[in-house]
Amino acid sequence: MMTRHGTFHALACGVLLLWAGLALAQQTTGGLAAPQAARYFLGREDEILMQVNVWGFVRQPGQYMVPYDTDLISLLSYAGGPREEAKIKSVKVIRASSGEGGAPQVIEVDVKKFLKSADASMIPRLKPGDTVVVSGTTFHFVSKFFEFVWRIALVVQIVFMADYYSRQARR
């Protein structure tokens, strides 16, 4: 049986070890970045989660807390899937640098090719802080351009007709 003094001593040692570990982690990272383990979170039922971002042409872009072993296809599914005008032939995963002075990494994934081949090796596993960018197709941007031109033409036509009828009324 442990005495009160022994329990207090064990608790103090545990706190001291925790404090030393945190100080060492801050020292090894230069105090600039959190240790890799700090980028994971504990979810319900002790599930390990990480934070990732989805931008662009998906149904629900935003920031997601997903299980640590989530791949790109699963994340796109969490975000409601790609929209009709999404360019799934060139989905980008932007990964922050893994160390000091390291450059960010851009991984380009051809999801369309994956859907045809079902080759799971083409789909990367995500890491904490990854940002997935789903661009729009060229057709989408061309149609938006023509929609803009059509609206301008409509405004010009209304102005022209107003000017024409005001001249007719003066005669």
Image (cartoon, rainbow, N blue to C red):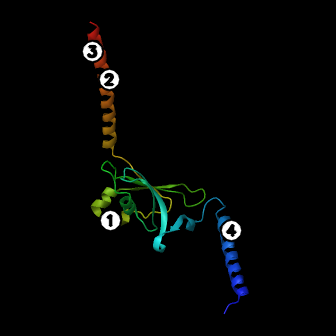
Residue 119: numbered disc: 1
Q: Are marks 1 and 3 in contact (CB under 8 Å)?
A: no
Mark 3 burial class by Cα count in 10 Å: few <14, some 14-19, many 20+ = few
Q: Which amino acid does label 2 sit on?
A: Val
Q: Do the residues labelled 4 and 3 touch (CB within 8 Å)?
A: no
Distance, label 4 to label 3, CA atoms, is 80 Å
Question: Which residue lies at the image location 37% right of the left edge and 63% below the top edge?
Answer: 74
Give the label, 4 or 3, closer to the camera.
3
Q: Where is residue 153 in the image (x, y as percent from the top left)?
A: 30, 26
Q: Do the residues labelled 2 and 4 touch (CB within 8 Å)?
A: no
- Mark 1–mark 2 CB contact (< 8 Å): no
Q: Mark 3 points at which residue?
A: 165
Does 135 appear above or below 107? Answer: above
Badge 4 or badge 1: first in the primary sequence: 4
Mark in front: 2 vs 3: 3
Residue visible at 33% across and 38% down? 144
Circle 1 SS class: loop
- Residue 19 point in image, percent of width and height: 68, 71
Which element is circle 4 on? helix
Query: Cα distance, mark 2 to mark 4?
Result: 68 Å
**How far is disc 2 from disc 3 in space, using C-alphas?**
14 Å
Image quadrant in which the N terminus is located = bottom right
- Residue at 52% across, 55% down: 104
Q: Nearer the viewer, mark 2 or mark 4?
A: 2
What amino acid is labelled 1 in the image? Asp
Q: In terms of sequence position, does the residue under pointer 4 or pointer 3 come before the other?
A: 4
Q: Position of residue 116 (x, y in %)?
A: 27, 60
Pointer 2 residue: 156
- Quarter of the image containing the C terminus? top left
Gap in angstroms between the C-alphas marked 4 and 1 = 44 Å
Q: Residue 23 carries which label?
A: 4
